[in-house]
Image (cartoon, helix red, strand yellow):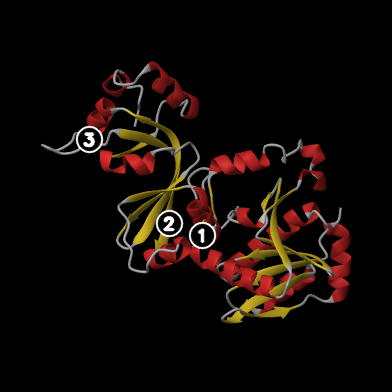
Amino acid sequence: MDFTDSRYAEALTTEQRAMLLDLHPEGKARFWGATPSHDGKMQGVATGDVVLFTGENRVRAVGEVGVIFRNQELADRLWPPSVDGKSWHTVYTLLDLADAAIPYADLNMAIGYRPAHNFPGQMVLRDDKARSVLEEFMITPGTEWDRETRDVVPPFDEYSRQATRIAALEEQRTRRTSYGRSGRLIVVNRRESSLVSEFKQRLLAEGRTVARFYCPGGISDLYVTDGSGAELIEAKSNSGHRYVRQALGQLLDYAPHSPQGADRLSALFPDRPATGDVALLHRYGIDCVHRVGQREFERSPAPEGCRDLMRQIWSR
């Protein structure tokens, strides 16, 4: 909506107009609202908070809150209430909006709600509840990406390991590919995030340290360390050739920025890729890992000679 249009602009205060133009300098934004019954839940909501739009027993879209304020006059011009209806007087914009397909059952499990719990159209995630959901479904608001990488991304000629920051375990909720995206908000394919979560639990059970790291090229899926060194893992939701190529490219992009120096690169898939695609990974010294059962995975290691040769390139 064009909020500079006189029909809406005259309903804005000077402060509200300034806030809108600061985050939406083009003068247009997606608007949403909440009725007085949501006042308690909307208290304290701020820029960068994540809102889930629900319906038909699933999360249908994920948004990132932009500007939020109370303005009944503007709300009633945007969404004229029915007779005796309630005004959507809490108005907020969306910095971004991405499609999603998260079943209520999965969302309830992540939050700790009863399996049959239903959701009222929109739900803003904050605090511990937000962390558990963002972590489980690998959702990253654009404001978080900007904040975490502001001091990470260097000039092009300084594209080096110095530009790396390790993400703590509770920050493990972001990606750069295989997502629904219209701007900076990242929502990972559910099949892929489930695969990462399952393999992460396997790694933790083995006593390995699991983290991720931010670097100029993006954010790693899994960064695993133990007494034998560091392993960088990139996961894909599909084992087709296109996905194998994506994993290969991302691993080679991220590897030079591995904080400890990568000793092993691995591509993770829900099932075994074609023989030729496994050979493609091996040619570049990359292991192929695929799921064979509940928390059961099989590894096809790259030849040591290829890995040793490629490690000289990873560490540059």
For residue 87, the mark is 3
Residue to which mark 1 is pinned:
137
Task: Give the residue drawn at x 68%, y 70%.
Answer: 204
Is 18 located above or below residue 32 in the figure? above
- Tell me whether the residue at label 2 lies in contact with that at label 1, contact meaning CB atoms closer than 8 angstroms: yes
Asked if residue 71 can be seen in this view, the reply is yes
Q: Secondary structure at mark 2?
A: strand
Badge 3 crowding class, 10 Å Cα cut-off, few under 14, some 14 to 19, many 20 or more, is many
| Crowd around label 2: few <14 · some 14–19 · many ≥20 (10 Å) | many
**Residue 39: x %, y % from top left:** 32, 39
Residue sitting nearer the eye, 245 or 93: 93
Q: Which residue is mark 2?
A: 100
Query: How many numbered circles are shown?
Result: 3
Q: Is residue 308 left or right of residue 249?
A: right
- Contact flag, marks 2 and 3 (Cβ < 8 Å): no
**Amino acid under label 2?**
Ala
Mark 3, secondary structure of its residue: loop
Q: Nearer the viewer, mark 1 or mark 3?
A: 3
Q: Using the numbered discs, state the Cα–Cα distance from disc 1 to disc 3 in whole angstroms.
A: 33 Å
Q: Amino acid at mark 3?
A: Ser
Tell me where residue 203 sits by quadrant: bottom right
